[in-house]
């Protein structure tokens, strides 16, 4: 069409237009005659009359498709050789390699994915997804854990990878609460994140709080624990778990993890980029408390204040829209009664309550000496515990040794373990020394008790004569 346009519209001679278009003059003349006869439609390429019809029998085509859908997926050359052999045996026309490749390439992608990669891969790629969004804030909260691509230093100075638990509001995408910790996820870490999410924040820039109607999570052991079920029942929260193996419903909280991974973590020392096999590019220097502060600042100052890419509104602004009041527990003590880990019942002694090898005192306990109480505590801070008597909050008891400092349960356990190791090492060395000194080539060393003069004489005589075996004395009776 370009050749004819040059000739008809711009007056270029047909021979020059054909040379510029890279076609022969004869072809250009044929195109010109067809255009003058039938217009532009006459220049359209006509489809083949036999297009869409195959000379192969349907059984042969189905055989090619069946071989292509086997697991593991065979090569096209293997399918062609197999089909050619069977076609010769049954008298079918042998298909060419190109025909086999065309049939294999024309298979439904969903069918191929289901056959070669399984139902999970087919569901993730081809099944329709229903995207649900809560109608109002605090209607649905999503909770999940992730191991951060970061190395920090623990209390002993050893590089470790921390975990992050996040509670996200489904409607606004605002972060209601989070906690960073070391070790595997547990019910305790989930409870601590929920405690921060539900109660009012000390930072006025972070307004998200309240009790949600629904808590949506996966089937982790911490989310399916009896303790969390009881907490949700007492606070009238409906606990909903996602379908096992189907993570699509938790996409919002997973997207938050991706934001932290791509924006915050690369700016921190000890970051582990993708593809480095778990090795940080810079030496880790952050502690757990410093990482906690960095994540909090990013959430409050950056994530909550900028417009979300999907909603177009900053998360905190969308959570505050409408001027509504969240549903709150009666008191922080009631919330702690539900969420914090419950220790074994303790007895109030005259010198206070003994817990974790520490002693806690409060003047209120003077009226409860000899009574059994329940001690609840924040494992990140053992300087203070909460005392409950018959499921009612009684007082806060303080450890006098730790009143000016904060110690965690892990620090206490680490110190105990270190002390036991030191004692065991001393015990082993002392026993080894005792065994070496009390065992010689001639037998055990005799007692070092002072010798009587008679014993000294016997000892001196024994030194002059070779040692003799003691004679066996006959047993005599009174009649003898």
Image (cartoon, rainbow, N blue to C red):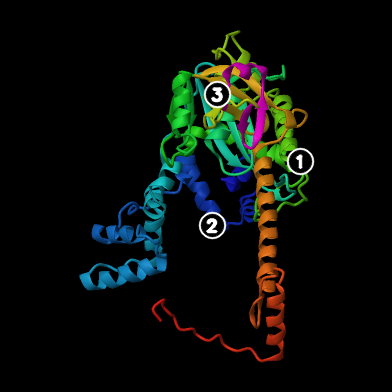
Q: Does the magenta run of residues contain 373?
A: yes
Q: Earlier in the sequence, mark 1 or mark 3?
A: 1
Instruction: Name the side, left or right, on which 59 lies relative to 28.
Output: left
Instruction: Name the side, left or right, on which 128 lies relative to 66.
Output: right
Real-space CA distance between mark 1 and mark 3, rounded to the nearest whole angstrom: 55 Å
Residue 201 position within the rendered picture, expressed as x and y whole percent measured from the top left: 67, 19
Residue 218 position within the rendered picture, expressed as x and y whole percent measured from the top left: 47, 36
Residue 72 or 457: which is nearer the viewer? Answer: 457
Q: Which residue occupies 63% across, 18% down?
A: 366
Q: Is residue 331 above or below residue 471?
A: above
Residue of label 2? 26
Residue 199 position within the rendered picture, expressed as x and y whole percent measured from the top left: 61, 19
- Residue 267: mark in rendering: 1
Foreground label between 1 and 3: 3
- Residue 370: mark in rendering: 3
Other-residue count near label 2 (Cα within 10 Å), few / some / many at <14 / 14–19 / ≥20: few
Q: Which residue occupies 37% across, 60% down?
A: 71
Residue 304 occupies which quadrant of the picture? top right
Q: Mark 3: which secondary structure?
A: loop
Please provide the residue range marked out in magenta: 352-375
Would you say the residues marked 1 and 3 are in contact, meaning their CB atoms lie under 8 Å apart?
no
Other-residue count near label 1 (Cα within 10 Å), few / some / many at <14 / 14–19 / ≥20: few
Other-residue count near label 3 (Cα within 10 Å), few / some / many at <14 / 14–19 / ≥20: few
Real-space CA distance between mark 2 and mark 3, rounded to the nearest whole angstrom: 115 Å
Q: Which residue occupies 55% across, 29% down?
A: 346
Residue 82 or 291: which is nearer the viewer? Answer: 291
Residue 136 position within the rendered picture, expressed as x and y whole percent measured from the top left: 52, 16
Residue 163 occupies which quadrant of the picture? top right
């Amino acid at each position: 069409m370009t050749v004819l346009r040059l000739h008809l519209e711009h007056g270029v001679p047909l021979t020059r237009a054909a040379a510029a278009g890279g076609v022969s003059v004869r072809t250009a003349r044929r195109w010109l005659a067809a255009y003058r006869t039938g217009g532009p439609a006459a220049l359209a390429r006509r489809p083949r009359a036999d297009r869409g019809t195959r000379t192969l029998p349907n059984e042969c085509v189905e055989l090619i498709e069946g071989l292509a859908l086997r697991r593991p997926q065979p090569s096209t050359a293997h399918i062609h050789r197999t089909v050619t052999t069977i076609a010769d045996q049954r008298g079918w026309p042998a298909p060419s390699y190109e025909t086999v490749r065309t049939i294999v390439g024309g298979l439904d992608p969903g069918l191929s994915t289901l056959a070669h990669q399984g139902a999970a891969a087919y569901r993730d790629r081809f099944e329709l997804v229903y995207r649900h969004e809560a109608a109002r804030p605090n209607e649905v909260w999503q909770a999940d854990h992730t191991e951060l691509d970061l190395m920090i230093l623990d209390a002993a100075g050893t590089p470790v990878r921390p975990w992050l638990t996040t509670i996200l509001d489904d409607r606004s995408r605002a972060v209601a609460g989070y906690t960073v910790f070391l070790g595997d996820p547990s019910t305790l870490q989930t409870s601590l994140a929920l405690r921060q999410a539900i109660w009012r924040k000390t930072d006025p820039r972070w307004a998200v709080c309240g009790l949600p109607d629904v808590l949506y999570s996966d089937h982790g052991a911490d989310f399916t624990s009896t303790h969390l079920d009881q907490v949700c029942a007492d606070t009238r929260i409906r606990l909903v778990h996602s379908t096992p193996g189907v993570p699509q419903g938790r996409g919002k909280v997973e997207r938050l993890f991706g934001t932290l991974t791509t924006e915050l973590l690369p700016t921190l020392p000890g970051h582990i980029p993708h593809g480095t096999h778990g090795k940080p590019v810079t030496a880790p220097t952050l502690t757990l408390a410093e990482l906690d502060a960095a994540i909090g600042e990013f959430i409050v100052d950056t994530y909550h204040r900028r417009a979300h890419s999907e909603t177009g509104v900053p998360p905190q602004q969308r959570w505050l829209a409408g001027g509504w009041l969240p549903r709150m527990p009666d008191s922080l003590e009631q919330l702690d009664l539900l969420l914090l880990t419950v220790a074994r019942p303790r007895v109030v002694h005259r010198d206070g309550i003994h817990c974790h090898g520490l002693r806690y005192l409060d003047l209120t306990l003077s009226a409860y000496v000899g009574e059994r109480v329940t001690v609840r505590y924040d494992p990140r801070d053992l300087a203070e515990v909460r005392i409950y008597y018959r499921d009612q909050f009684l007082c806060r008891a303080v450890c006098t040794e730790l009143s000016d400092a904060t110690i965690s349960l892990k620090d206490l356990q680490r110190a105990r373990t270190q002390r036991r190791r030191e004692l065991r090492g001393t015990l082993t060395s002392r026993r080894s020394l005792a065994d070496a000194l009390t065992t010689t080539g001639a037998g055990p060393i005799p007692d070092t008790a002072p010798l009587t003069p008679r014993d000294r004489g016997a000892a001196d005589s024994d030194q002059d004569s070779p040692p003799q075996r003691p004679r066996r004395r006959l047993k005599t009776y009174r009649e003898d």
